[in-house]
Image (cartoon, grey):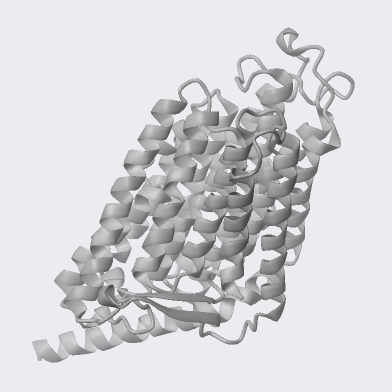
Amino acid sequence: MLSVLILVPLIGAALIGFSPSGINGKFARGVALVFASIAFLWTIILAIQFHPGQITQQFAESLPWIDVLGLNYNLGIDGLSLPLLVLNGLLTCIAIYSSDESLQRPKFYYSLILLLSAGVTGAFLAQDLLLFFLFYELELIPLYLLIAIWGGEKRGYAATKFLIYTAVSGILILASFLGMVWLSGSSSFALATLNPTTLPLATQLLLLAGILVGFGIKIPLVPFHTWLPDAHVEASTPISVLLAGVLLKLGTYGLLRFGMNLLPEAWAYVAPWLATWAVVSVLYGASCAIAQTDMKKMVAYSSIGHMGYVLLAAAASTPLSVLGAVMQMISHGLISAMLFLLVGVVYKKAGSRDLEVLQGLLNPERGMPVIGSLIVVGVMASAGIPGMLGFISEFIVFRGSFPVFPVQTLLSMIGTGLTAVYFLILLNRAFFGRLSAQVTNLPRVYWSDRGPAAILAVLIVIFGIQPGWLARWTEPTITAMVNSQNVVVAVSLDKAMGTRD
């Protein structure tokens, strides 16, 4: 059942890529949307059949692949990966639907998006370290090409920078994975049989360092963040939706699955430093966002700050904080995708994203009042206004982290206030006041432009009012994961105390 989620977009990519050269962009988009929708509906079917109370991997598939390397085709779903799979399916459909019908080389473009979706899906499903790495690297080339070919004026620079950073990320992650398997004496890369907790603490810390930096680049965390604003600014709107909404979550997912879960003793040892690192990322990202005049770059820097909340929650490693981390990933995926879509519409219709040029876009007669209203909803959600998903996810993160790291949690809460500051600057400059002379006679905005963002807005409000509908899928898995980690740490401490005695 799980292989279908990977095979459907791969088949769609192949059919579009090898179709006759005469097909137009509209037809290619329609075919891509059909295959993406099938994959998304299949994730919904799996979610309906998923048993939240079962903490082991569900719908598991296992096939031998390359025995000499210890590589097997192991797939599975649990409460950590299921919400991210659904998010990936939804945003892939939205990205394809939001793509311009008149773009150049449409067959190649839509094939790359489907290939990207297959890679991300495989990474979330993989229950084998080496298989995860293969899927993790699979998404690298499609995203590079999507930025380099269909990006803005400096697309070559942004795409190359992304490629270099992500390649370094992959090298560090692979080195840590290989170290876990070889040093622990395991015969395969399967997560079910791997037990690196038997390694000395110094070795675990070295392996964890590679994982932290590798996935820290992907998230991204300060100071490994500089590729992200460039990539977002130069990428087209649909690619920014996928980049912020899904691809960054590979980093946070990797920290939870392979850092906190596999190396709990080392994780507990460095947790105070991780919490401090989270504070730096939160405050630095928010401060940089305040200084921006480009709407898209402002939203990009906000991602750096909001991903810092996930690291804070993971560092605290309480059942409540890690549940908050997963909900924050989903919350950020929906909110950032919505904001990038709306900023893209503003740029398409007004011809600018510069806050020094835009003004009065909420004008009910000649502006974009519906788009402006949706941006207000997105801003409120990102700033943590009650009744929206952004509020409840951040509240759970702070509530779960405060007993462990009270100072770092309080400092991170300042980031929520700064989020309100920079987004109020955006609203005040671009949407309130008189309509500026530079953006008069705006083209009409159709519901096809507003629809994807409106769908995301509805989901943000629904899950904000009823967060239990989202949390119920994840909570049992997270609780079992954290309790297992605490047992390992307690045993290690007992051994250390016994040695001293």
Q: Is residue 70 left or right of residue 297?
A: left
Q: Where residue 295 sits in the image (x, y, percent)?
A: 59, 28
Q: Quadrant of the C terminus?
A: bottom left
Nearer to us in this view, 385 or 48: 48
User: Which residue is the extreme one toward the left?
Assistant: 500
Question: In this view of the protein, can residue 139 be seen by the observer?
Answer: yes
The answer to whether residue 283 is above or below residue 24 is below
User: Which residue is the extreme one toward the right?
Assistant: 365
Which residue is pictured at 38% across the width and 41% down the height? 225
Q: Where residue 370 sits in the image (x, y, percent)?
A: 83, 34
Q: Is residue 352 left or right of residue 212?
A: right
Q: Where residue 291 sits in the image (x, y, percent)?
A: 49, 27
User: Which residue is the extreme one toward the top?
Assistant: 437
Which residue is pictured at 70% across the width and 35% down the height? 342
Q: Where residue 268 sits in the image (x, y, percent)?
A: 30, 71
Q: Is residue 67 left or right of residue 418?
A: left
Question: In this view of the protein, can residue 410 be seen by the observer?
Answer: no
Which residue is pictured at 39% across the width and 38% down the height? 162
The answer to whether residue 358 is above or below residue 322 is above
Q: Which quarter of the picture shows residue 349?
A: top right
Nearer to us in this view, 384 or 446: 446
Number of callouts: 0
Q: Is residue 274 left or right of residue 108?
A: left
Q: Quadrant of the N terminus?
A: bottom right
Which residue is pictured at 75% across the width and 40% down the height? 27
User: Which residue is the extreme one toward the front?
Assistant: 20
